[in-house]
Amino acid sequence: MHIAERTFRAMGSDGHIFVVADEPLGEELVQLAIDRAELLEACWSRFRPASELNRLNSTAGHGPLHVSDDLFLLVDRMKQAWELSGGLFDPTVLGSMTALGYDADFATVSSRSSASSLDDIAFSAAPGMAGVVLDAEAATITLPMGVAIDPGAIGKGLASDVIARELTTAGAHGVLVNLGGDLVFTGSTEDGSGWAIGVEDERLPVDDPDRLVRLLEFPTGPITAGVATSTTLKRRWAQGRRHHVIDPRTGAMSVSDLVQVTVVADTAWEAEVTATTALLMTADDAERWLRQRDTTAILMTIDRIVVTSDELESRDEGVQHG
């Protein structure tokens, strides 16, 4: 078997794709993955005026809109995530995001020289997904008045899942898709060994030798898993005073003592949703919640690391636990 690999840009982030397949299929599948990521971004991006997502947001309060399978899947997973998280994961925080100045792609936002005072912004709780109606038979979505949705905290993970599944169906023996740190792997590695995923510590500089804080090693065999990290440290703007993690209960930026959460789940979208939900809790509450769900996770505050898996703890030395 042959491994094909490529790095690329997608959804405002760095992408990385590995495909284990017979030659020359691997190279063809890598290009298919990159093309598919572009199609999903064209559909889901709130930064592309002609995207189907923006068309849906423009219809809020005006009845159902017939949508593509890709957009229906995205909104369906958004609503599932909102329900499973008890409303803590909420894609309807778009109003707060734009009020904070995240109204364009991040490169544009981060290049701006100034931002209004937070005191000038009137934050309010997110409206939530309760009124969003999905009709699978008619392939329509209805948004209530005043609701607009943002795929920022789920789109990259879900795109990774979609691409990995489609490449496997197309003949890949193994696939790893990483879009901006939301990754999924499925099938076998080139030599049949288990997949190994490094988790980086965003509290440290990129050239710090201790930045690789964990190596998650998975058993051999054709398994599928998703890994995602949510953090308040990475996408910051206005001289570092603002970040993109919004608490839907207030509409303001999260003020949790957690600064980074990495989660392992069955899919990348579930890992991202779980990590984002935990990041909105205090470290103690998040650890309790994740342990109750038997979720493998790594949580970081400014001064400590907490892991929720006994296997991770047994391999760890010198880490403070909650």
Image (spheres, rainbow, N blue to C red):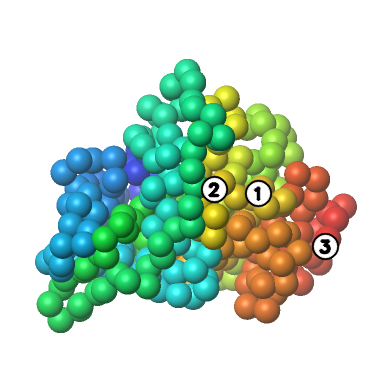
Q: What type is the residue that disc 3 sits on?
A: Gly
Q: Which mark is residue 122?
A: none
In what quadrant of the picture does the C terminus appear?
Answer: bottom right
Compared across the picture, whether 176 is left or right of 305 comes to left
Mark 3 and mark 1 lie on one chain; the one further toward the N terminus is 1
Mark 1 crowdedness (10 Å alpha carbons): few <14, some 14-19, many ≥20: some
- Residue 78 visible (yes or no): yes
Disc 3 versus disc 1: nearer the observer: 1
Q: Give the amino acid type for the residue marked by disc 2 in the picture.
A: Ala
- Which percent across, then down, holds residue 288? 72, 72
Dot 1 amino acid type? Val
> Which quarter of the picture shows residue 169?
bottom left
Q: Where is the N terminus found, in terms of image quarters?
A: bottom left
In this figure, which residue is indicated by the disc labeled 1? 255
Inter-mark Cα distance, 2 to 1: 9 Å
Q: Residues within 10 Å of mark 3 (few under 14, many from 20)?
A: few
The residue carrying mark 3 is: 322
Residue at image coords 60%, 50%:
254
Instruction: Please tell me which residue is depicted at 44% across the width and 22% down the height of the picture.
Output: 111
Count how many numbered circles sit on residues in the image.
3
Residue 46 location (% of width, % of height): 29, 45
Residue 226 against residue 94 in the figure, above or below? below
SS for dot 2 = loop
Q: Image height check: is 187 above or below 238?
A: below
* Residue placed most toward the observer, 149 or 174: 149
* Residue annotated with mark 2: 252
* View extreme (top): residue: 113
Mark 2 or mark 3, which is nearer the start of the sequence? Answer: 2
Q: Residue furthest bottom?
A: 137
